[in-house]
Image (spheres, rainbow, N blue to C red):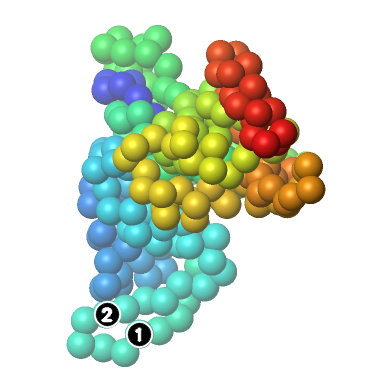
Amino acid sequence: MILRNGQCRGKNTFTDVLSELVSGFSLRNITLLTSVTGQFNSILSNRVFIVLNELTTFSSSTGHEVDKLKSMITDPTLEIRTKFSSSRVEKNLLNFILVSNHLDPVHLDQDDRRYLVCQCDSKYTKNTQDFNNLFQHIIQEGFYDNFITYFHKLDISQFDARIIPMTEAKKEIIEVSLTDIDRFCIQYFKQLKDGWLCDEAQRYCPDFIKPANFRLQIHKNCETIKQHRIKKFIRLYKIKEDKIAELEQYVEDDDNEEIINQINDERYNT
């Protein structure tokens, strides 16, 4: 889970209560991602709940560290590495909450199935009276006993952890995470959906993407097809069927369609 945006919105109150609920098996305030993804990770042994707090933006993070976190969320086992000792394998029981005030604390692919992203409401920001009332309940004797009893009695027979809601906050992170080639395919979606001459597509490629990289990266979303036109074969880029829905949701009216289609028609007939 990712809790995103704004200071003084009670994010840490929520995570502190959950951490205390499994005290001894939780880490409530990890501020460096490398503390859990680094070479030595003995702090993860026998943990079931970890709060990664105040994460920076993804663009400021090391990409491979975020990728390591992905595998830690889904892998069934966990390798525990201790300095000056042999590594060992444990069952992976880890559950994460990522807390951040930044728009893009992690990189999310369009088909992400790991993260639930929640936007924290600002309704009670700086409302000290409400928070004081809440804290008085939390410190009361028996609060945690009652809280864990509630969870034990909660009916989750119809709950499916594989179904993760697509929230507006998650959509925003996914859009921020789009790569340059994703944005190119969105901008020229209509041409690429119908099939666009390869050399013409490359002419419209942004200057900061090298031609060799463009030809390699475009195959993330497109396939190269051959068609026979006017006694010769032509090569076109065409968006893969399983990528159409993912990209189409970002498409706006394309002012370039008419001129690019005209260029294609001219090339087809020469």
Percent x, y for residue 7? 27, 23
Q: Is residue 227 left or right of residue 171?
A: right
The residue closer to the viewer here, 251 or 7, is: 251
Instruction: Tell me which residue sits at (66%, 45%) in the image.
Output: 236
Outermost residue to the left: 84
The residue closer to the viewer here, 206 or 220, is: 206
**Residue 61 can be seen in this image:** yes
Give the total of numbered labels.
Answer: 2
Instruction: Tell me which residue sits at (26%, 12%) in the image.
Output: 126
Pointer 1 or 2: first along the chain: 2
The residue closer to the viewer here, 209 or 174, is: 209
Percent x, y for residue 81? 32, 78
Q: Amino acid at mark 1?
A: Ser
Q: CA distance from mark 1 to mark 2?
A: 6 Å
The quadrant of the rendering that contains the C terminus is top right
Label placed on residue 151: none
The residue closer to the viewer here, 121 or 104, is: 104
Dot 1: within a 10 Å radius of its alpha carbon, few (fewer than 14), some, or many (20 or more) residues?
some
Instruction: Tell me which residue sits at (29%, 18%) in the image.
Output: 132
Instruction: Place residue 76 in its image quadrant.
Output: bottom right
Label placed on residue 82: 2
Q: Is residue 201 above or below residue 129?
A: below
Q: Is residue 258 left or right of residue 125?
A: right
Instruction: Tell me which residue sits at (45%, 48%) in the image.
Output: 214
Dot 2: within a 10 Å radius of its alpha carbon, few (fewer than 14), some, or many (20 or more) residues?
some
Q: Kindly state the secondary structure of the residue where label 2 is placed.
A: loop
Q: Are marks 1 and 2 in contact (CB under 8 Å)?
A: yes
Q: Amino acid at mark 2?
A: Thr
Label placed on residue 87: 1
Percent x, y for residue 43? 29, 66
